Image (cartoon, helix red, strand yellow):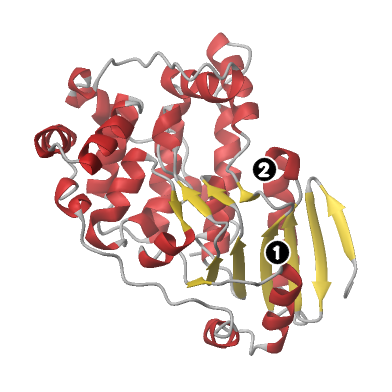
Amino acid sequence: MTNQAFQKSNITVSRHGGLGVVMLDRAEALNALSFEMVLEITKVLQNWASDDSVAAILFIGAGDRAFCAGGDIRTLYYAGIDYQSGAKNSVVPVDFFAKEYAFNQYLFHYPKITIAYMDGIVMGGGYGIAGHCDVRIVNDNTLFAMPETGIGFFPDVGSLYHLLKCPHNYGRYLALTGARINGRACVAAGLADVFVQGVSVVVLKDIVRASSFDKAGILKMLTDYSVAVDQAEVTEIEALFSDCDVEAIFARLRGLQTDEAVRILDELTSKAPLSVCVTAEYLKRAADFSFDQVIEMDFALAQAFVRSGDLYEGIRAQVIDKDRNPQWQHKSIHEVARGDVEVYFEPARYALRAHRIFST
């Protein structure tokens, strides 16, 4: 299959010597991940894991706008509405998360070198691919966000494992607000490994094939194209997000009254109050979690969110009707009771370990 490609379920797969390439090929939908795409990519990775002629895997996105803008939440919306109306049981929307998270976990532990070229929009499920790769490459076109609190959900796909490692409490800020950042900020925050300029996909394939097929070798080969990025600076964000107490965060934002504080307060106020509070509690609980603990918790929380009206209202407002006017269950974070949050962390009906693609 060397230098040949085949397409199936909106992915295009090709081989270039020891390099396997997976292109998310759904440019008209910003390469959003569908259930079928997750299944097909998983099969490809399983086949290549036992193929000694494949040394590394490169993930790219079709078109020039996005690597992957997230999961196919439109399909999730209709499955969820059917569940809430009684037409389907919760297994239908839950199964999508089970397969996606099992794939995320498999990719995190994958036995061969993996590379993601985060060219364009990288959000939600897109970072569930790129974030778990060994080499994460960004450029001037990169736009990253985990915007889930804006649709009544939470930052999932194992992203909290990486967000919690960001310096200066920056990951808390990104998780709660869904703020968008560029490629340089991704490197500074530790969410990507190298910022490059002037690297086409063709050039990148050649670089990887000429390397020793390990992380250090690939990064060394990228030196001629890479741009140094300064370490993340200490800003107001560090003090504003010094803990996971949502009431305290809002109070600090209101008290500071700087341009940045006003901007962040506006961002947070527009999000689903319950999602913000649940995400804050998750950030607190997951501070010392391993990746496998994070992805298991993601699956437990997803099952709770599938039962929540905020998720479907958020998708409706942002994607279906596009009126950008969601009517959340709670008008503000002050209406969210402790019990409203704790119920999300009760034992879930299904465990992700039953869906694992490998043994841990």
Q: Which residue is mark 2?
A: 30
1 vs 2, front mark: 2
Query: What percent of the width, then of the height, locates residue 229?
Result: 40, 72
Label 1, label 2: how many angstroms apart (C-alpha)?
A: 25 Å
User: Which tag, 1 or 2, sits closer to the chain's start?
Assistant: 2
Q: Within 10 angstroms of label 1, few (less than 14), some, or many (20 or more) residues? A: some
SS at mark 1 in the image: helix
Q: Residue at x 42, y 31 (%)?
A: 150
Q: Is residue 331 left or right of residue 131?
A: left
The disc placed on residue 292 is none
Q: Is residue 86 left or right of residue 30?
A: left
Residue 203 shows in the view: yes
Q: Residue type at mark 1?
A: Gln
Q: Which residue is mark 1?
A: 46
Q: Residue at x 76, y 50 (%)?
A: 25
Residue 21 sits above or below residue 329 on the image: below
Q: Residue at x 23, y 60 (%)?
A: 168
SS at mark 2 in the image: loop
- Of residues 302 and 75, the one nearer the viewer is 75
Q: Is residue 311 left or right of residue 338?
A: right
**Residue placed farthest to the top in the image?**
85
Q: Residue type at mark 2?
A: Leu
Query: What percent of the width, then of the height, locates residue 289?
Result: 31, 57
Query: What percent of the width, then of the height, locates residue 353?
Result: 49, 51
Q: Within 10 angstroms of label 2, few (less than 14), some, or many (20 or more) residues? A: many
